[in-house]
Image (cartoon, rainbow, N blue to C red):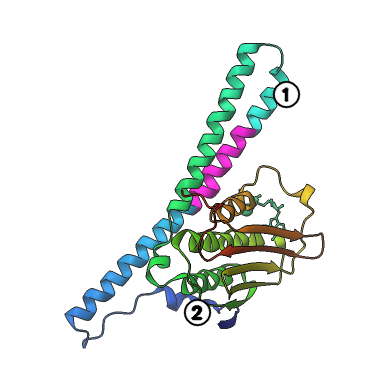
């Protein structure tokens, strides 16, 4: 297991990480080629992450706005004209299909790092970026886990969306990520010491938590959110190493 606490780096350290070091005169052509390949893979991974975030945030926001408009049209016009009711119901079905497509696209944009360096190192890289951007302290307790690709992706997206939610809503000072490997079960927990929320007060129309549940359940796992005002939030999932009978392929 790897345990670490990551705190925000000073700006100088941050900027030095962003600048590629010039090749030393001793660098062989082979080393140069592999450095170039590494840089290309990193750029591709960043682009996929960017696309996945755009789809989740921007397209998700647009679809949510459309859903709210349909709900308000249904409230005003519903029940008076059968043709209008039929078209509104059809619009709702179309929207549901668009949400499902968005989820499949985001799911399919697996970060290349999962294939390259594996889940634990990918999570560590994600946490480092999060800490630099948010200044929130994050402790990680990460076992090395062996799991199929869909399970790894479900874990990766759960941690990613939990951290996004923490940055957006929690007003937390610290967060903790645990990834445990016990017998046939993998457990992942992301908790924060922020303001928490009551189930009924969550912003309507959000699909981050819903998407996490969907991904976890689609690989046969169980998903839980515990939160209460003033008592932080804890998002957790337990997943079978071998997807169970409830698992569905995407
Ligand atoms: N760590 C957290 N701390 C405080 N509130 C949270 C936290 N995580 C989620 N919430 C609350 O739960 C709501 C639902 O979260 P969810 O991720 O499902 O949707 P969203 O973030 O609002 O929208 P989306 O993820 O689709 O961009 C949030 O709007 C917020 O009110
Ligand atoms: Mg969210």
On the rendered structure, is 102 left or right of 163?
left
Mark 2 nearby-residue class (10 Å; few <14, some 14–19, many ≥20):
few
Q: Residue at x 49, y 43 (%)?
A: 102
Specify the quadrant of the image occupied by residue 172: bottom right
Please say if 173 is above or below 31: above
Query: What is the magenta segment's predominant secondary structure?
Result: helix
Please say if 61 is above or below 16: above
The quarter in which the N terminus is drawn is bottom right
Q: For mark 1, what is the residue?
A: 75
**Residue occupying the far bottom of the picture:** 26
Q: Circle 1 — which element?
A: helix
Cα separation, mark 1 vs mark 2, equals: 55 Å
Q: Residue at x 45, y 56 (%)?
A: 50
Comes first in the chain, label 1 or label 2: 2
Is 97 within the magenta? Answer: no
**Pick the front one: 240 or 214:** 240
Q: For mark 2, what is the residue?
A: 12
Q: Residue at x 52, y 63 (%)?
A: 156
Q: Circle 2 — which element?
A: helix
In this view, the mark in front (1 or 2): 1
- Residue 140 coordinates in the image, percent (x, y): 60, 77
On the rendered structure, is 47 left or right of 155?
left
Q: Residue at x 53, y 59 (%)?
A: 154
**Residue occupying the far left of the picture:** 29
- Residue 247 coordinates in the image, percent (x, y): 53, 53
Q: Which residues are magenta?
A: 53-67
Q: How many marks?
A: 2
Please say if 101 is above or below 66: below
Specify the quadrant of the image occupied by residue 142: bottom right
Specify the quadrant of the image occupied by residue 178: bottom right
- Residue 173 coordinates in the image, percent (x, y): 71, 72
């Amino acid at each position: 297991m790897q345990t670490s606490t990551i705190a925000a780096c000073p700006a100088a350290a941050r900027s030095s990480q962003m600048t590629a070091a010039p090749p030393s005169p001793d660098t062989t052509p082979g080393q140069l080629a592999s450095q170039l390949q590494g840089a290309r893979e990193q750029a591709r991974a960043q682009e996929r992450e960017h696309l996945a975030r755009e789809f989740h945030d921007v397209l998700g926001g647009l679809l949510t706005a459309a859903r709210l408009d349909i709900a308000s049209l249904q409230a005003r016009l519903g029940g008076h004209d059968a043709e209008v009711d039929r078209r509104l119901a059809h619009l709702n079905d179309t929207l549901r299909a668009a949400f499902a497509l968005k989820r499949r696209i985001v799911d399919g944009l697996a970060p290349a790092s999962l294939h390259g360096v594996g889940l634990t190192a990918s999570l560590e890289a994600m946490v480092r970026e999060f800490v630099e951007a948010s200044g929130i302290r994050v402790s990680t307790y990460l076992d090395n886990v062996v799991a199929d690709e869909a399970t790894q992706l479900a874990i990766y997206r759960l941690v990613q969306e939990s951290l996004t939610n923490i940055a957006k809503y929690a007003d937390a000072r610290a967060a903790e990520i645990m990834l445990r490997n016990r017998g046939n079960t993998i457990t992942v927990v992301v908790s924060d010491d922020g303001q928490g929320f009551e189930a009924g007060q969550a912003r309507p129309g959000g699909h981050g938590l819903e998407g996490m549940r969907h991904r976890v359940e689609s690989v046969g796992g169980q998903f839980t959110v515990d939160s209460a005002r003033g008592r932080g939030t804890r998002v957790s999932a337990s997943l079978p190493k071998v997807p169970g009978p409830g698992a569905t392929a995407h």
